[in-house]
Every structure is written in C-alpha cells, then in structure tokens.
Amino acid sequence: MARAKTVHTIEYCDKGNDLKIPLKLVSDSDHRGAAPDFEYQINLDEPIHCRLRGKDPEVITKQLFELLNKHFEISWAPFLYVRVTFGETNCNYSGSNTRGREMHVLIDYVLIGSKPDGTFVHDFYDADREVYTGGPHKPRYNHYAQGKPEVTSAPKKRWSSREDIETKSLIEDTPANRAALNAILAAMEKLTYQLSDLLSKDKIQATLANMPATVNIGMQT
C-alpha cells in the first residue's frame, strides 16, 4: 500500500508567478515485512496537469521548472474548430446497396498557444471537462501539437474520386459564437424533421410530385 507524505514545499517565483508546490515522499511495499520502496512525487493540476515521480528530488524539481517555464512562455487562448463535410454515403441495408448524401457540422474545442518567437501550438480537449473540474481547461504539457489546426478558405474536395467536400474554420471561443453555432445546429435539426416528414409514407408521393416547391425548403430567409 502506497503512502505519501509532504516533505518539502517547492517555490516557483518566475514570470510573475508565485507558486508553492508540495514535494511528497511516497513509500510503497508490495509484500508484508518487505522493506518499503521510496520515491519522490509531484502531482500538479494547476496551472498545468503533470505527474512527476523519481528517486532524486532535485531531478524531478528541475523537470517541473522546465515544464512551468515552457507553459508560461506560451500565451493560450480558447478557439472553436468548425468543420462542415458533405458527400456521398454508401451502406449495405437489408442486403441492398443503399446510396445517399449526408452532411455533418463538427465542432471541436481547441486551445491555441502563441510563443514569443511567433510560432503556435495547439491542444484539443473535451469541453465537458470544464463542467467536471468547475473551471476552464488547462493545456496538457506533453500533448502540444505544432502550429494551428488546418483551415480552408473555401470548400474543397476531400477525395479525388468522390464528390465529398469539406470546409475547416477556426474562430474564437466566446459565448456569442457558441450561441450562434448552437442556433445553426438547432435549425439543422428542425430541417431534418421537416425533410423526414415530407418523405414519410403518407407524404412522399405528393412531395415528389411537387418538387419545384419542395426544393426551396430551408432556403427561406
């Protein structure tokens, strides 16, 4: 059974920060009567998430400072990564080759980090984490990806042999932008219900016979 005891407080006073971080001594014995194994441990959740463990406290303290220095030299900002895809779909339904079209609006949450040299890094995350932790997401020190997520200036084909198209955009993560995107998603859901109703068994024949009027669904302003 592992036991941990705080044996020292590490002070990090740099880049306008004054952090006090506990250094713990962990003893672990797998067998009764056996000599316990000792290691030093640092568990940190703010301002970064990291877990460090080792025999030499000076070594893991140095690792901690390197991670904190790396973190604080980057200026982080939350963004929304919005992708729209549209294309042909094929599936085998009840032994038949089913064909159709499908569209997806995909929203990812990403932190964009700006470095002093003008380069960028980014880290995708689950927005639900904000609910679980009661606060904003913190970048994971060992999960940075270089640059920014890819964006497109206009819709482009994803596959040369198919008609799939895709757009990729990056916008600031603000309450107003989230609300606007949610409104678009709600409108898409409403349109889906309308289309399902028009193609229901009782209405599909009339819908197809009245195509000039039907194709304008969803295009009204």
Image (cartoon, helix red, strand yellow):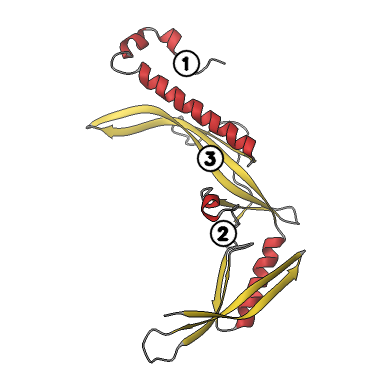
Marks 2/1 in contact by CB < 8 Å: the verdict is no
Mark 2 vs mark 1, CA separation in Å: 44 Å
Residue name at image x 36 percent, y 88 percent = 32
Mark 2 vs mark 3, CA separation in Å: 20 Å
Q: Which residue is mark 3?
A: 107
The correct choice, above or below, for 118 with respect to 103 in the image is: below
Marks 2/3 in contact by CB < 8 Å: the verdict is no
Q: Which mark, by number, is residue 143?
A: 2
Mark 3 vs mark 1, CA separation in Å: 25 Å
Label 1 Cα neighbours within 10 Å, binned few <14 / some 14-19 / many ≥20: few
Give, as a three-letter code, the residue at label 3. Ile
The correct choice, above or below, for 175 with respect to 52 in the image is: above
**Which mark lies nearer to you, 2 or 3?**
3
Q: Earlier in the sequence, mark 3 or mark 1?
A: 3
Among the 4 quarters of the image, the one containing residue 116: bottom right
The correct choice, above or below, for 131 with respect to 66 in the image is: above
Residue 163: image location, x then y, percent: 46, 29
Q: Quadrant of the C terminus?
A: top right
Q: Quadrant of the N terminus?
A: bottom left
Residue name at image x 54 percent, y 55 percent = 133
Give, as a three-letter code, the residue at label 1. Ile
Q: Secondary structure at mark 1?
A: loop
Q: Which residue is mark 1?
A: 217
